[in-house]
């Protein structure tokens, strides 16, 4: 099993899958193999795939999105890794995806939450609200993606592998400039200490060996400490973790006394809703969101 999973990892890295996708796919493949008594997937077929996915929906009562992720992992396992085409799986018990309305802050609520944040957590949350960024889009911003001249942010490789341009609110221009100045100071220290490299997507590091140490490619919100890249083994400064911001926003929502099932993503919903309320046409809002 270990050899097969290593082959899966290698193929996903060749195809530039994100580390998160790699980890989740490998986890589902491992669960699938264990579920069927550690038999090799090549000896299994559509019936076994259906049994596993139905088990997830009926016995473990997983969310529809979770079952979809497991399905995608198994399709990758068979179609891409083992080169086995499975017949259409008609008998899978699908987890039902609930139809829920998005949670939205009022303008007063959004400002109340932001008022209970400070420093770069306030800045990150303000970008979620003011630019409609997803959480990971915010954390993965690079210095080169902030265009102060045109007051816009370029979101690279967003959901669906799409690039887009969204607005940069005037209120955040100066705070972002100060944040980038702090990033430059940290980067200069890293360089002096023999580090300063950052992860580059799509094998750009091989094409442009010196690019990973340039300031333009540094993360706008870097991690507080350097760490070992799990793929390359190199010591680098990655971007900040999402959990710190998620916890800070949860605490701010609670402190603000807002009794809604809200999260970081609620700022993105609120961004779209408040643009529509301000008179923007829906196509413009869709473009800002990357839909």
Image (tube, rainbow, N blue to C red):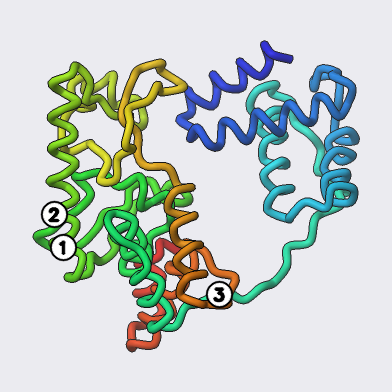
Going from the N terminus, do you reach mark 2 or mark 3 first? 3
Q: Name above or below for residue 190 compared with residue 143.
A: above
Instruction: Tell me the residue at 13%/58% (across/down).
Output: 148
For residue 174, say whether it is visible. Answer: yes
Look at the numbered discs 2 and 1 and tell me whether their residues touch, using CB distance below 8 Å.
Answer: yes
Residue 55 on image: x %, y %: 88, 43
Tell whether label 3 touches label 1 (CB within 8 Å): no
Image x and y of residue 269, in percent = 47, 71
User: In the displayed structure, does residue 202 sit left or right of residue 216?
Assistant: right
Which element type, helix, strand or loop, lies under badge 1? helix
* Left or right, 270 with reference to 38: left
Say if 129 sits above or below 245 in the image.
below
| The one of 58 and 50 positioned closer to us in this rendering | 58
Question: Which residue is labeled 1 in the image?
Answer: 173
- Residue behind mark 3: 103
Residues tagged 2 and 3 counted as in contact (Cβ below 8 A): no
- What residue is disc 2 on? 177
Q: CA distance from mark 1 to mark 3?
A: 28 Å
Task: Give the answer, above or below, for where 240 lies relative to 210.
Answer: below
Q: The C terminus is located in which quarter?
A: bottom left
Identify the residue at horizontal 81%, vertical 38% (top origin).
87
**Gap in Å between the C-alphas at discs 2 and 1?**
6 Å
Within 10 Å of disc 3 (Cα), the crowding (few <14, some 14-19, many 20+) is some
Q: Position of residue 33 (x, y in %)?
A: 80, 25
The circle on residue 13 is none
Res. 200 in view: no
Instruction: Name the residue: 79% across, 30% down.
Output: 32
How far apart are the two marked residues, 2 and 3, measured between alpha carbons? 31 Å
Label 2 secondary element? helix
**How far across and down, in percent of the image, does residue 140 sit?**
35, 44
Res. 29 image quadrant: top right
* Residue 96 in which image quadrant: bottom right
């Amino acid at each position: 099993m270990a050899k097969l999973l290593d082959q899966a990892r290698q193929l996903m890295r060749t195809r530039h899958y994100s580390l998160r996708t790699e980890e989740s796919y490998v986890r589902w493949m491992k669960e699938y193999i264990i579920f069927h008594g550690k038999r090799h997937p090549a000896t299994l077929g559509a019936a076994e795939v259906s049994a596993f996915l139905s088990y997830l929906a009926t016995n473990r009562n997983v969310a529809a999105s979770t079952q979809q992720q497991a399905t995608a992992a198994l399709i990758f396992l068979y179609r891409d890794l083992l080169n086995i085409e499975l017949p259409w799986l008609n008998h899978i018990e699908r987890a039902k995806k609930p139809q829920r309305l998005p949670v939205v802050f009022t303008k007063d609520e959004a400002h109340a939450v932001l008022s209970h944040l400070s420093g770069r957590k306030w800045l990150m949350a303000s970008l979620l609200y003011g630019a409609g960024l997803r959480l990971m889009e915010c954390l993965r911003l690079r210095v080169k993606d902030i265009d102060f001249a045109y007051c816009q942010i370029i979101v690279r490789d967003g959901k669906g592998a799409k690039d887009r341009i969204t607005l940069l609110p005037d209120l955040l221009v100066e705070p972002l400039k100060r944040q980038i100045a702090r990033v430059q100071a940290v980067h200069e220290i890293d360089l002096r200490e023999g580090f300063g490299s950052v992860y580059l997507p799509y094998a750009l590091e091989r094409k442009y060996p010196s690019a990973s140490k340039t300031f333009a490619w540094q993360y706008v919100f870097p991690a507080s400490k350097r760490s070992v890249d799990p793929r390359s083994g190199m010591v680098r400064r990655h971007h900040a973790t999402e959990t710190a911001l998620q916890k800070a926003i949860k605490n701010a929502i609670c402190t603000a006394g807002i009794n809604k099932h809200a999260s970081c993503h609620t700022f993105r919903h609120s961004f779209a809703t408040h643009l529509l309320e301000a008179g923007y046409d829906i196509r413009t809002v869709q473009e800002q969101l990357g839909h």
